[in-house]
Amino acid sequence: MNLPEESAVLSSWKDIARYMGKGVRTVQRWEHHLGLPVRRPNGASHKSAVLLDRSDLDAWLATRFSPRGAGKDLAAKGAEPSDSARNTLREGIRTARALRDANHALTQEIYESIRLLAERCDRLTNHALEVPWSLPDSAAQRPPTHPESKRIA
């Protein structure tokens, strides 16, 4: 039984399967697992009649599946990517490499800054442990400078 070409609606699992070039069970699995957009009468059970608009099916197929060997077909026909497509791709690759290098340089700067910070924190900690509450030697040798001390002298 051939599908009528004028009919935009597929009205059975067999029609849907034939239109897709698959088996009935495969198409039913696709409805269950992949969300094939079939329609059923309101309140009908899972085993009731189904309807599927061809345009809905074609749109669903376009979003779910890519054509097999599309790149191989272009190569077999001798079709080469355009120069503008190549240039766009090359520029994208250059940009990605520049970003990667900049990211690497910034990461190294961060690591070095963290290392220096940790080193300085260690020095401060060690110095505080050695001489906890003392003044530097130069401050201890200077006499205090108070306004009252000048009047006495």
Image: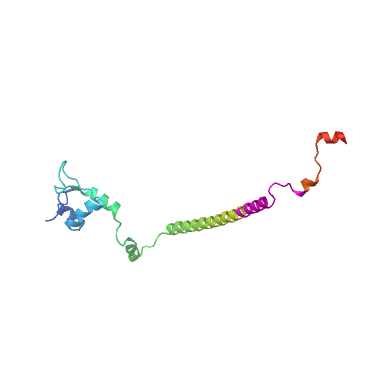
In the displayed orientation, state which residue is furthest to the left: 1
> In the image, 138: left or right of 120?
right
Where does residue 70 sit, x and y in percent of width and height? Answer: 32, 60
| Nearest the eye: 138 or 28 | 138
Classify residue 44 by image quadrant. Answer: top left
- Looking at the rendering, the stretch of residues picked out in magenta corresponds to 118-137
> In the image, 138: left or right of 39?
right
In the displayed orientation, state which residue is furthest to the right: 153
Q: What count of labels does the image hold?
A: 0
**Residue 129 inside the magenta-drawn segment:** yes
Where does residue 20 sit, x and y in percent of width and height? Answer: 21, 56
Where does residue 29 sit, x and y in percent of width and height? Answer: 21, 54
Quadrant containing the C terminus in the rendered view: top right
**Residue 87 inside the magenta-drawn segment:** no
> In the image, 114: left or right of 79?
right
Q: How is the image coloured?
A: rainbow
| Nearest the eye: 147 or 7 | 147
Classify residue 66 by image quadrant. Answer: bottom left
Residue at coordinates 80% horizontally, 36% vertically from top-left? Answer: 146
Quadrant containing the N terminus in the rendered view: bottom left
Residue at coordinates 57% horizontally, 54% vertically from top-left? Answer: 110
**Magenta span: chief secondary structure:** helix
Where does residue 48 sit, x and y in percent of width and height? Answer: 14, 47
| Nearest the eye: 14 or 128 | 128
Classify residue 14 by image quadrant. Answer: bottom left
